[in-house]
Image (tube, rainbow, N blue to C red):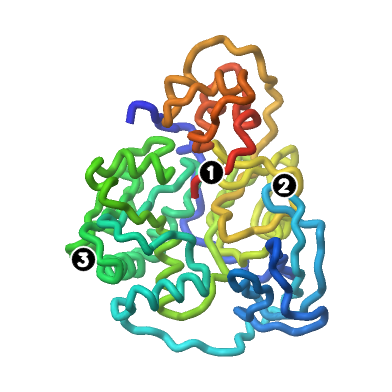
């Protein structure tokens, strides 16, 4: 773990203790993937959880309301995307009430996989005969609190689901990792895990970027365990699986950290998928400095948004409103920090200076940019690769 750091400056950012709901946006914007077809018409009234877009998978409406049409003015990760607009009627009407399954341990593997795929609980390959199930309860970015709040709010449901998965997937061992500085959750899970003797709790040092899947696997498991196969889920995946198996319904809401030094009270929000970033910020944030920029999915590794006409998707973990840094990039002083601290042993300075260099091993953790005393934004030189990890 020598190539990781403790990020101490985030401890000054405290988050509200309770999750706040923002589940009543006036409109939701549902991205239309390439090759998918809209199966509802303008002016149609749709139910919450109704299939509205169809392709290789189904896409469901997160609200009930009226179909307004299609817009090409919304963004995901700064790229324009066509979205179906639904005007919320605030009634949360559901066409079919699904029965509740009392015992999720009773599901057969194929039945479980069918439900996970149908309702898109997560995007994980469960079909390999892995011997270890690794549960990631560590927030990917040290400034995020999303996974911590999921554990705090749903620890009983998480443990029930993990125990069921152990049986359904026929794995030999299950390891649940939690940040050792997350004291409340350590105590909470420790007090309840005794009921589940097959789940092993492992406390992880508070260092970055240990929340990245490949880094966590490498530092928690032995070479033998890795070679025998690993299924890795984060706690949001587990909670989504619980809801799919227990309630047989799609995921239409998610927890998102909203933080940064440009707002008065950082918090974790339960928000409808499809909500616009501008709408969320307007309704939940008390902005204390209008000279801010927005970063999503990690203050260290995240993406700076060019527009607030962006959409909350199932992969959105966090939103940061941060005051603009007017310091300018200066010449490299050859300190070697980016090289010595790269968790996958790359040389960011070399990659920056050689456009054709192999960047495929980069996990886009942003550590090189965060540590650079010359304020060099290595992220701009390492973009364009598809190796980002969940």
State the SS at label 3.
loop
- Is residue 11 shown above or below 139? above
Q: CA distance from mark 2 to mark 1?
A: 16 Å
| Residue position for label 1 | 388
Q: CA distance from mark 2 to mark 3?
A: 44 Å
Q: Is 224 on the left-hand or right-hand side of 310? A: left
In the rendered image, residue 373, in percent from the top left (x then y), is placed at 56, 18
Q: Is 337 on the left-hand or right-hand side of 83? A: left
| Residue position for label 2 | 78
Q: Residue at x 54, y 70 (%)?
A: 251
Q: Residue at x 72, y 72 (%)?
A: 37
- Residues at badges 2 and 3 in contact (C-beta under 8 Å)? no
State the SS at label 2.
loop
Q: Which sits earlier in the primary sequence, circle 2 or circle 1? A: 2
Which of 345/332 is in front?
345
Which of 103/350 is in front?
350
Res. 196 mark: 3
Q: Taking the image as drawn, is residue 188 in sight? A: no
Q: Quadrant of the N terminus?
A: top left
| Comparing labels 1 and 3, the label whose residue is closer to the camera | 1
- Residues at badges 1 and 3 in contact (C-beta under 8 Å)? no
Q: Taking the image as drawn, is residue 80 in sight? A: yes
| Comparing labels 2 and 3, the label whose residue is closer to the camera | 2
Q: Which sits earlier in the primary sequence, circle 2 or circle 3? A: 2
Which of 165/227 is in front?
227
């Amino acid at each position: 773990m020598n190539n990781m750091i403790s990020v101490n400056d985030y401890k000054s950012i405290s988050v509200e203790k309770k999750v706040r709901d923002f589940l009543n946006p006036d409109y939701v914007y549902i991205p239309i993937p390439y090759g998918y077809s809209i199966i509802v018409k303008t002016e149609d009234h749709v139910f919450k959880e109704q299939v509205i877009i169809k392709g290789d998978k189904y896409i469901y409406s997160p609200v009930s309301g009226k179909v307004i049409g299609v817009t090409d003015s919304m963004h995901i990760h700064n790229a324009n995307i066509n979205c179906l607009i639904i005007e919320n009627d605030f009634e949360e009407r559901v066409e079919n009430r699904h029965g509740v399954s009392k015992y999720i341990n009773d599901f057969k593997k194929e039945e479980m996989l069918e439900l996970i795929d149908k309702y898109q609980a997560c995007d994980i390959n469960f079909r390999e005969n892995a011997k270890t199930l690794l549960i990631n309860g560590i927030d990917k970015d040290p400034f995020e609190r999303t996974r911590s709040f999921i554990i705090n709010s749903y620890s009983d449901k998480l443990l029930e689901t993990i125990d069921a998965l152990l049986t359904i997937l026929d794995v030999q061992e299950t390891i649940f990792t939690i940040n050792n500085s997350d004291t409340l959750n350590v105590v909470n899970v420790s007090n309840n895990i005794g009921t589940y003797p097959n789940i092993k709790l492992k406390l992880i040092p508070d260092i970055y970027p240990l929340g990245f899947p490949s880094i966590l696997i490498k530092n928690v498991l032995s070479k033998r365990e890795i070679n025998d196969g690993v299924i890795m889920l984060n706690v949001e995946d587990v909670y989504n699986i619980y809801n799919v198996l227990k309630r047989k319904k799609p995921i239409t809401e998610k927890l998102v950290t909203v933080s940064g030094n440009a707002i008065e009270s950082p918090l974790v929000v339960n928000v409808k998928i499809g909500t616009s970033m501008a709408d969320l910020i307007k309704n939940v944030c008390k902005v204390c400095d209008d000279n801010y920029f927005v970063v999503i999915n990690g203050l260290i590794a995240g993406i700076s948004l060019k527009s607030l006409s962006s959409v909350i998707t199932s992969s959105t973990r966090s939103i940061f409103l941060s005051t603009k840094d007017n310091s300018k990039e200066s010449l490299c002083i050859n300190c070697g920090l980016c090289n010595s601290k790269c968790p996958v042993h790359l040389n960011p300075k070399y990659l920056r200076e050689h456009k054709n260099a192999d960047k495929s091993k980069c996990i886009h953790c942003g550590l090189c940019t965060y540590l650079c005393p010359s304020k060099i934004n290595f992220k701009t030189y390492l973009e364009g690769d598809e190796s980002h990890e969940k």
